[in-house]
Amino acid sequence: MEGYSEKQLGIILVAERLFADKGFHGTSVRDIAQEADVNIAMISYYFGSKEKLLEAVFRYRMTASRVFIQELVDNDTMGPLEKIYSLVDRFTNKMLNEQHFQCLMNREQMNSEPSPVKDLIWELKTEMMGLMVPIVTRAQEQGIFYKDVDIVLLMSTLFGTLHQVVPAKSYIRSDPEFANLPDDEFVEYLKIRVSAHLKKLFKAILTHEF
Amino acid sequence: MEGYSEKQLGIILVAERLFADKGFHGTSVRDIAQEADVNIAMISYYFGSKEKLLEAVFRYRMTASRVFIQELVDNDTMGPLEKIYSLVDRFTNKMLNEQHFQCLMNREQMNSEPSPVKDLIWELKTEMMGLMVPIVTRAQEQGIFYKDVDIVLLMSTLFGTLHQVVPAKSYIRSDPEFANLPDDEFVEYLKIRVSAHLKKLFKAILTHEF
DNA sequence: GGCAAAATTAAACAAACGTTTGATTTAAAC
DNA sequence: GTTTAAATCAAACGTTTGTTTAATTTTGCC
């Protein structure tokens, strides 16, 4: 299914960024073609349509997400809290490395009409839940985690916080403290800060310790 | 500045819903006109343009948000934790009562290009922060709240979780447990559940108690 | 009733949209 | 070198877009 040429991948990455920045309908195929430096017709030629291009963007990133989840499942040597920490760490990294795609996903999940893309998001959410729930419930049965935890909403807290961080970036950056910090360094700083915040939150709510 | 006729308000509310459901560019003025049962020209006639209509939607909801914030500031008889609880309660209610607008705000804050609407969102965020920070820092000085709290990210957690709840609604609802619960009752159930989750989170992280 | 302002309408506007066409170039295979 | 398929292109396609026009109706006031 995969195996994109350099040109095709260029289109996908440009589309990802523009869809994230301006929305699907706010981005014209001419915008994409111009920024990706290809002829307009190539988009239909390669992907069939603008809609299908959006799906291609999603499939491209979501296969990576699947691998990502599987790695977490396979690594079964850690204790529950370490597992949660690792999960938080990796999600934080993923989110801030894939800011455009995460914005796009945040946008698309709000659409009211059903679509193949919404189905993909739903699947991914279900898989994430299937990853998280067993870790927590097993630890609860072992008495390591407390029981009065709303796992579904805790996932909403995790993803909600991470999604919120992207638009909050410019807000946090407006602090003169970060005035002349290069953008990539600021992102690295953010990763550490966000991950620490989330770990503290999860530890407190799950173990009642600090 | 306010004082909309019934017809104008009808347009604003329809636009709010459609912008939230399909995005600004995904919604045509013809869609709005049809659902609001007015002639297409009335939108330009009343609001000037589609863009200005979006701004009108924002101004309409945000004046209410300002009042909302001021009420919280004025009510100064509570202790810090009660204040946080009240804040969580009211934000949860607001979020689930204004789902369309909150979706819309979530969408618009992601746009890359500056706009009057983005400025409004920025202002509101700043005001929210100005409300939250004094409550927490004062309680920290009094030794009631712990100091190792990232207030900015805690706000991201609050709004992120709440924003995430709207798209998560259908996910939670898919549980057979809620199969034949009327939608408004389900929303009331959600309010209680979300508010309880957030209070637990805030109490744990701020007071180290449960 | 008559008048002026506001509200409402159908129709038309140019611009932008996603997509397709048909011709042309490039690449690969024999 | 010829042939065949893939890639690329400018141009044009028919829609849909947001907005405006100019005519008509409704409204409020004297």
Image (cartoon, coloured by chain):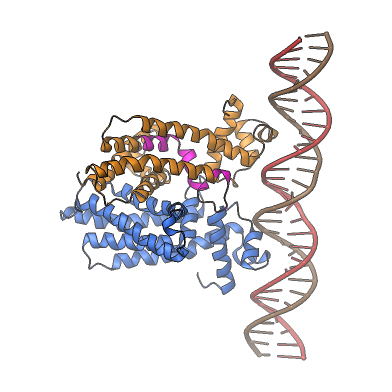
Chain colours: A orange, B blue, C red, D brown
Percent coordinates x, y for residue B150 in the rendering: 28, 46
Residue in the picture at 50% in, 55% down: B104
Is B51 situated left or right of B153 in this image? right
Bounds of the magenta segment: A90-117
Q: Is residue A111 magenta?
A: yes
Count all numbered tags in the image, as a single digit: 0
Tell me the quarter of the image containing the C terminus of chain B.
bottom left
Image quarter for residue A163?
top left
Q: Residue furthest left?
A: B143
Percent coordinates x, y for residue A187 in the rendering: 38, 35
Question: What secondary structure is the stretch in magenta mostly built from?
Answer: helix
Q: Is residue B164 magenta?
A: no
Q: Is residue A123 visible?
A: yes
Classify B6 as above or below B152: below
Percent coordinates x, y for residue B145 in the rendering: 19, 53
Is C14 situated left or right of B49 in this image? right
Percent coordinates x, y for residue A116 in the rendering: 57, 44
Image quarter for residue B82?
bottom left
Image quarter for residue B191?
bottom left
Q: Is residue A203 visible?
A: no
Classify C22 as above or below A142: above
Residue in the picture at 34% in, 44% down: A175
Residue in the picture at 27% in, 31% down: A78
Front-most of residues D17 and A2: A2
